């Protein structure tokens, strides 16, 4: 499956061979590049952009979630003058809160910000067939459940320690530069800590902007990045009695079915001392409350006696925005639309994209000594697409095949009982790589999948006759 | 509903208080639910007369029950939801079909198993049930052997399609023969005819109803749509 995905990927960027040629010729011919333009915008890696005198490159990051925090840290460490603007420093965001194992290593997260380690999952089909997955996990492998306010705060504090300036403020608008290397002027309201105050208007001049302000990104609006389809995720935090909480000690549940969601799944995720019960949908947003009730009904026996302590909802992007970059403004994280299909995972990709974008800026500006231009930021997009396209595509295929109808969901849960499937799923989730796997097992898997789908659809046709 | 729609279009977290109040009015009031507060109200007047500070007690009592059974502190109470009947069937034993009860002439009657499972799924689709750890459902459709599926589902349709193909084929053979004088055996040797035959077979397999043409077109669009969404940002570069 992965080889097919890779093949289709190389067709994605037909211009890549050209790019490599032009950068190679540049290295062998270090002249000011008034010549050698195959196309107007090619990879000239900022070697043509002017050196900045008297100061370092200034970058503003709008939004202080995982994407903003990771980007700010990398920029600050790279010697760039960074300001991070976040409107609510103690924001307890509505979120599943699951992070893959690789994030802990890649971002050096301390183990105490992880509230829970989920090592077992239960998938429950529309006809309540329940399958346990997680047998194949090694003892050191787990899915980390975190509180967003804790994680976001930690990443921001680390960025501040590296030299970034964290500002509590609300981004209002951005003035485009009047000249090729003129600065962007960002307008924001700086909060002074008084409750209910509107804050004082501040402007700042920066050379580049990273939009990390989430699904309703204002930066995206100001660069006409376009819209995306989004799902509504609706969640209720429920405090359940201790004996019931014991069951969810390190287990998360996924409920699939038309009653729970027509195109997504319902979940019960354990949090620090309560569970989050929720569901989501793209196509039937007005019915979200109905789906939530159905989810609570399906989990009823396990959350009996619980008290709802909080209700929350948030949009989740379904695919990247049409434009993720314009001149020297780049989008990362949810603002760019980097949420996977099928699982709806976004935290890791937000942080990683923030870091990648910052790395591209650091490299393109030679540690803040030169100006950057759009081509340097495009490097980040290219690297991102190349690294994670297979993951996104595979999850898209899974969603299209297995979330489309009840028979498909029954087949999905049946397939999850297979050990090979579990191993592949967890490997790709925990380490964010699409592993090729054993071809013979892949063939067996394909045959079994088709068999499950055929059986479930046959039963469904019979159901229609009743 | 309109208040919740407005809620979704703006950033949710700041609007939480207004949201929860709207949720209070929208929780389903099952018949049981409405009985609870009334019960309490019945008992209150008695106490009020005893106490003398009647009004205060009534208000408190009412607020208590409302806080418990509706709104933010909503209890997922055991007493409230005895909605509908659970799926029950004598042949459904500990979360799976008991094959011993499906015996016919000493062999398992797989058709009856399939029928039973169909009825169960239909029931659950109309009356979703809570998933219970003490009574897990472990039925797997793969215990039904492959030939039972083929006999029941594939063969009738295969018969239908083959019948159609045979009728069309016979008529076409006659038609071509009458026009060109080429007999059936000579037709099969001709390359053009073989191509036509191949197209006809593929067509019958893929397009069985008129709707299938639309379905196939949509399928092709579907497989490439996500790629287009990802490539969108690179279209910019080409334009520049």
Image (cartoon, rainbow, N blue to C red):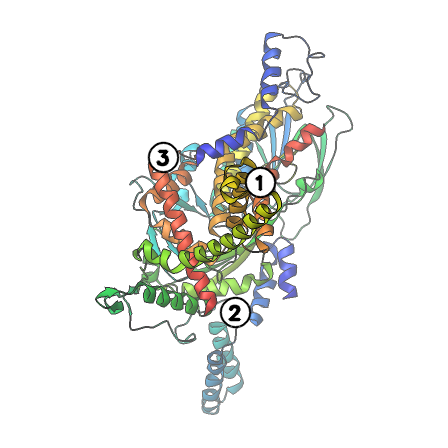
Q: Where does residue A40 sit, x and y in percent of width and height?
A: 71, 21
Q: Mark 3 lies on which chain?
A: A
Q: Residue lying furthest right in this view? A: A178
Q: Between label 1 and label 2, give the one nearer the viewer.
A: 1
Residues marked 1 and 2, same chain: yes
If the image is split into quadrants, where does the C terminus of chain B sit?
A: top right
Q: Residue B224 carries which label?
A: 1
Q: State the mark number for residue A439.
A: 3
Q: Taking A68 as reference, is A185 left or right?
A: right
> Tags 3 and 1 in contact by the CB under 8 Å rule?
no
Residue B71, numbered circle: 2
Q: Is residue A409 left or right of residue A383?
A: left
- Mark 3–mark 1 Cα distance, whole angstroms, equals 25 Å
Task: Tell me the subunit letter for badge 1.
Answer: B
The residue furthest front is: B181
Given this view, does label 2 or label 3 mark the residue nearer the observer?
A: 3
Closest to the observer, A427 or B92: B92
- Please indicate whether residue A444 sits to the left or right of residue B38 in the image: left
Q: In this view, does A78 lie to the left or right of A446?
A: right
Q: Do badges 2 and 3 share one subunit?
A: no
Mark 2 to mark 3: distance in Å?
54 Å
Q: How crowded is mark 2: few (under 14 residues within 10 Å), some or many (20 or more)?
A: some
Location of residue B208 by image quarter: bottom right
Where's the N terminus of chain B, which quadrant?
bottom right
Residue A138 locus on image (x, y percent): 30, 40
User: What subunit carries mark 2?
Assistant: B
Name which quarter of the figure residue A287 lies in: bottom right
Pick the residue in front: B146 or A223.
Answer: B146
């Amino acid at each position: 499956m992965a080889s097919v995905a890779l093949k289709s990927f190389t067709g994605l960027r037909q211009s890549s061979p050209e790019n490599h040629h032009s950068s190679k010729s540049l290295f062998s011919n270090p002249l000011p590049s008034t010549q050698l333009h195959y196309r107007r915008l090619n990879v000239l890696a900022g070697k043509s952009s002017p050196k900045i005198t008297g100061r370092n490159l200034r970058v503003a990051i709008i939004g202080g979630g995982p994407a903003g925090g990771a980007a700010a840290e990398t920029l600050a460490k790279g010697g760039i003058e960074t300001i991070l603007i976040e409107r609510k420093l103690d924001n307890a965001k509505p979120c599943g809160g699951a992070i893959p194992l690789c994030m802990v290593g890649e971002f050096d997260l301390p183990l105490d910000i992880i509230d829970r380690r989920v090592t077992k999952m239960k998938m429950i089909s529309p006809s309540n067939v329940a399958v346990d997955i997680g047998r194949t996990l090694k003892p050191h492998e787990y899915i980390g459940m975190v509180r967003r306010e804790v994680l976001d705060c930690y990443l921001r504090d680390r960025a501040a320690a590296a030299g970034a300036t964290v500002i509590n403020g609300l981004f209002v608008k951005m003035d485009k530069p009047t000249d090729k290397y003129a600065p962007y002027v960002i307008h924001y309201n700086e909060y002074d800590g008084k409750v209910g105050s509107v804050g004082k208007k501040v402007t700042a001049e920066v050379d580049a902007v990273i939009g990390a302000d989430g699904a309703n990104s204002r930066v995206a609006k100001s660069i006409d990045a376009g819209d995306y389809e989004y799902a509504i995720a609706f969640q209720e935090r429920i405090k359940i009695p201790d004996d019931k909480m014991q069951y969810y000690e390190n287990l998360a549940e996924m409920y699939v079915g038309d009653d729970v969601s027509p195109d997504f799944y319902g979940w019960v995720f354990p949090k620090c001392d309560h569970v989050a019960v929720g569901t989501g949908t793209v196509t039937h947003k007005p019915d979200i409350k109905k789906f939530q009730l159905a989810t609570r009904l399906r989990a009823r026996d396990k959350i009996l006696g619980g008290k709802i302590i909080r209700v929350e909802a948030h949009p989740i992007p379904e695919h990247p925005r049409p434009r993720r970059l314009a001149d020297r403004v780049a989008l990362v994280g949810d603002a760019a639309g980097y949420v996977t299909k099928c699982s709806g995972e976004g935290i890791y990709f937000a942080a990683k994209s923030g870091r990648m974008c910052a790395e591209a800026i650091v490299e393109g500006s030679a540690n803040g000594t030169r100006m950057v231009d759009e081509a340097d930021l495009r490097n980040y997009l290219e690297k991102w697409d190349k690294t994670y396209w297979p993951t996104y595509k595979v999850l898209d295929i899974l969603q299209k095949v297995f979330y489309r109808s009840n028979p498909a969901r029954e087949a999905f849960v049946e397939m999850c009982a297979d050990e090979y499937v579990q191993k592949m799923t967890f490997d790709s989730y925990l380490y964010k790589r699409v592993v090729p796997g054993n071809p013979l097992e892949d063939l067996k898997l394909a045959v079994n999948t088709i068999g499950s789908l055929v059986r479930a659809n046959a039963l469904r046709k019979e159901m229609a006759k009743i | 509903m309109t208040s919740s729609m407005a809620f979704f279009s703006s950033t949710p977290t700041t609007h939480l208080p207004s949201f929860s109040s709207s949720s209070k009015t929208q929780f389903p009031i099952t018949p049981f639910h409405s009985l609870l507060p009334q019960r309490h109200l019945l008992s209150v007047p008695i106490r009020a007369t005893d106490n003398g500070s009647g009004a205060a007690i009534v208000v408190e009592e009412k607020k208590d029950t409302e806080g418990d059974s509706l709104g933010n502190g909503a209890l997922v109470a055991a007493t409230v939801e005895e909605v509908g009947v659970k799926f029950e069937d004598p042949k459904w034993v500990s979360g799976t079909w008991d094959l011993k009860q499906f015996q016919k002439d000493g062999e398992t009657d797989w058709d009856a198993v399939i029928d039973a499972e169909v009825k169960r799924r239909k029931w659950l689709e109309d009356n979703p049930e809570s998933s219970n750890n003490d009574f897990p459902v472990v039925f797997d459709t793969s215990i039904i052997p492959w030939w039972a599926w083929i006999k029941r589902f594939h063969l009738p349709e295969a018969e239908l399609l083959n019948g159609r193909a045979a009728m069309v084929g016979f008529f076409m053979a006659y038609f071509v023969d009458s026009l060109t004088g080429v007999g059936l055996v000579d037709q099969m040797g001709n390359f053009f005819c073989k191509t036509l035959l191949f197209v006809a077979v593929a067509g019958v397999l893929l397009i069985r109803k008129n709707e299938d043409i639309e379905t196939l077109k949509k399928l092709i669009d579907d497989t490439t749509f996500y790629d287009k969404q990802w490539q969108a940002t690179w279209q910019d570069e080409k334009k520049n």
